[in-house]
Amino acid sequence: MMSDVNTTGDVTTANYDAQQLVEEIKEGEEQAPNVDVSADYERSKQFDVAEVDRTEAGSQAAAEVSSESSTSAGDPNAFREMAKEVNKPDEE
């Protein structure tokens, strides 16, 4: 029987678990996972673009953000104001 999944992040334990699984597959105690890389790749393509980006609304939003950020990008005063807001001393 396969050992429990390693959730501790310990590499030694993870390597041991992987080795145990390999041995159990060889002995016929566990079934080898079925991996279809081509099918997985084709399925992953549906997530490469957000649904909203496939619509006119997504295109308009991207254009608006691009034009807004290009006009204020690099404005030192905007960064100073933001820093002042973030670094306000706590009022007691």
Image (tube, rainbow, N blue to C red):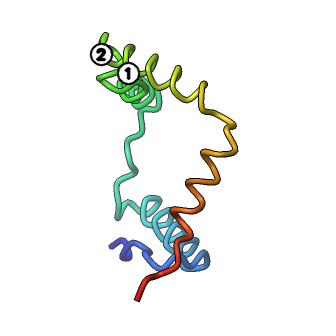
Residue flagged by tag 1: what amino acid is it? Answer: Ala
Residue flagged by tag 2: what amino acid is it? Answer: Ala
Q: Is residue 47 left or right of residue 72?
A: left
Toward which corner of the image does residue 16 lie, by quadrant?
bottom right
Q: Residue at x 57, y 62 (%)?
A: 84
Disc tally is: 2
Q: Residues within 10 Å of mark 1 (few under 14, many from 20)?
A: few
Picture layout, residue 33 above or below residue 13: above
x, y percent for residue 1: 33, 73
Q: Residue at x 42, y 32 (%)?
A: 36
Picture layout, residue 32 above or below residue 92: above
Picture layout, residue 39 above or below residue 26: above
x, y percent for residue 15: 58, 71
Q: Which residue has dot 2 on it?
A: 57
Q: Is residue 69 left or right of residue 27?
A: right
| C-alpha gap between disc 2 and disc 1 | 6 Å
Between 24 and 56, the one lying in front of the other is 56
Which of the labelled discs sits on residue 4, or is there none? none
Q: Is residue 37 left or right of residue 31?
A: right
| Callouts 2 and 1 close, C-beta under 8 Å | yes
x, y percent for residue 43: 36, 27
Q: Is residue 67 left or right of residue 76?
A: left
Q: Residue at x 60, y 75 (%)?
A: 11
x, y percent for residue 82: 56, 54
Picture layout, residue 67 above or below residue 27: above
Between 8 and 14, the one lying in front of the other is 8
Q: Residue at x 53, y 20 (%)?
A: 67
Q: Which residue has dot 1 on it?
A: 61
